[in-house]
Image (cartoon, grey):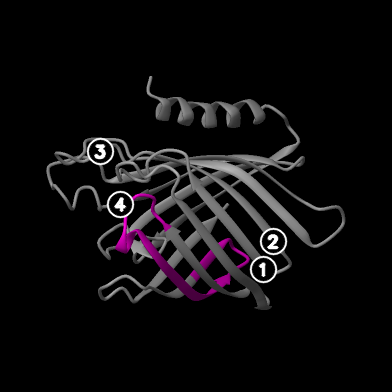
């Protein structure tokens, strides 16, 4: 078994082992988005995507889960291939510093792209570690790629930093502003770029939600994108 598959199996096994403790809760969601953006770049060629996730959270602060989305960036390169889905597994620990409003979050996320790849394309499966801190409505998260980043040769050690502010301004209504920067190791020019978004969300008592965000990045090209999302939490 390859190191990447071992990493994925480890994440999932750890989640299953922790799930045996009853002092925990499970939550999930199903979402339809008009465009799946990852760090400011479309993963679906500006087409809609179906997404779903499941998270197990223990009262101690440990959590584990899985998330998936339809994609097209691999099949766009070659319509004959079968890789048109992203499946993520994650595990982590989150808590607060004493009784303060300062929080922390540390963990790992494995991105898995099952199926075939275009000719000459290297394995896109990626493992990233992350460390996050928060204070009230402010948060920051730093990501470090242990493996090559999404199939880019010799890009292990790539990093990403996300900063965001999110707050509820009326019952069920919230707004978010975020900015991030991606550094891809061993790649010049477009290997380093910034991305940002502003958005508003409405959550209903039924568990349904709707959101709208404006997104952009500083890469060359028409990257301004409005994303509409419809979700159901359970």
Relative to 91, say whether 159 is above or below: below
Q: Is residue 172 left or right of residue 79?
A: right
Mark 4–mark 3 contact, CB under 8 Å? no
Query: Which of the two discs, 4 and 3, sits closer to the camera?
Result: 3
Q: Residues within 10 Å of mark 4 (few under 14, many from 20)?
A: many
Rendered position, 213 above or below 231: below
Residue 198 magenta-drawn? yes
Q: Residue at x 14, y 39 (%)?
A: 119
Which residue is disc 4 drawn over?
71
Distance (Cα) linking label 4 and label 3: 17 Å
- Which residue corresponds to mark 2? 134
Q: Are marks 4 and 2 in contact (CB under 8 Å)?
A: no
Which residue is at 33% across, 50% downward? Answer: 70
- Left or right? Give the position of 230 relative to 140: left
Please give the residue where the numbered disc 3 appears in the rendered image.
122
Sort mark 3 into few (<14), some (14-19) or many (20+) by Cα contacts within 10 Å. few
Mark 1 or mark 4: whose residue is earlier in sequence: 4
| Res. 48 in view | no
Residue 35 or 182: which is nearer the viewer? Answer: 182
The residue at 77%/60% (across/down) is: 102
Residue drawn at 12 percent across, 42 percent down? 80
Q: Which mark is residue 138?
A: 1
Q: Quick one: SS at disc 2? A: strand
213 displayed left or right of 138? left
Identify the mark nearer the N-term, 3 or 1: 3
Q: Which residues are magenta?
A: 183-210
Q: CA distance from mark 3 to mark 1?
A: 37 Å
Q: What's the distance in space between the residues labelled 2 and 1, CA to CA?
A: 6 Å
Task: Give the spatial CA distance, label 1 vs label 4.
Answer: 30 Å
Q: Residue 209 placed where, x, y %?
A: 53, 66
């Amino acid at each position: 078994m390859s190191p990447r598959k071992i990493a994925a199996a480890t994440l999932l096994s750890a989640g299953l082992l922790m799930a045996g403790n009853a002092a925990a809760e499970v939550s999930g969601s199903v979402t339809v988005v008009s465009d799946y953006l990852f760090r400011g770049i479309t993963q679906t060629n500006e087409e809609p995507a179906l997404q779903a996730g499941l998270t197990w959270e223990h009262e101690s602060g440990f959590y584990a889960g899985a998330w998936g989305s339809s994609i097209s960036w691999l099949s766009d390169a070659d319509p004959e291939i079968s890789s048109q889905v992203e499946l993520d597994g994650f595990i982590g620990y989150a808590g607060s510093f004493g009784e303060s409003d300062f929080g922390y979050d540390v963990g790992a996320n494995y991105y898995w792209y099952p199926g075939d790849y275009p000719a000459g394309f290297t394995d896109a499966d990626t493992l990233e570690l992350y460390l996050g801190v928060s204070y009230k409505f402010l948060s920051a998260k730093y990501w470090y790629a242990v493996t090559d980043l999404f199939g880019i040769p010799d890009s292990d050690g790539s990093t990403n930093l996300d900063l965001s502010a999110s707050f509820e301004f009326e019952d069920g209504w919230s707004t978010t502003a975020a900015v991030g920067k991606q550094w891809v190791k061993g790649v010049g020019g477009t290997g380093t770029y910034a991305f940002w978004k502003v958005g508003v969300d409405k959550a209903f008592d039924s568990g349904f939600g709707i959101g709208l965000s404006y997104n952009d990045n500083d890469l060359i090209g028409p990257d301004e994108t409005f994303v509409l999302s419809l979700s159901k939490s359970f």
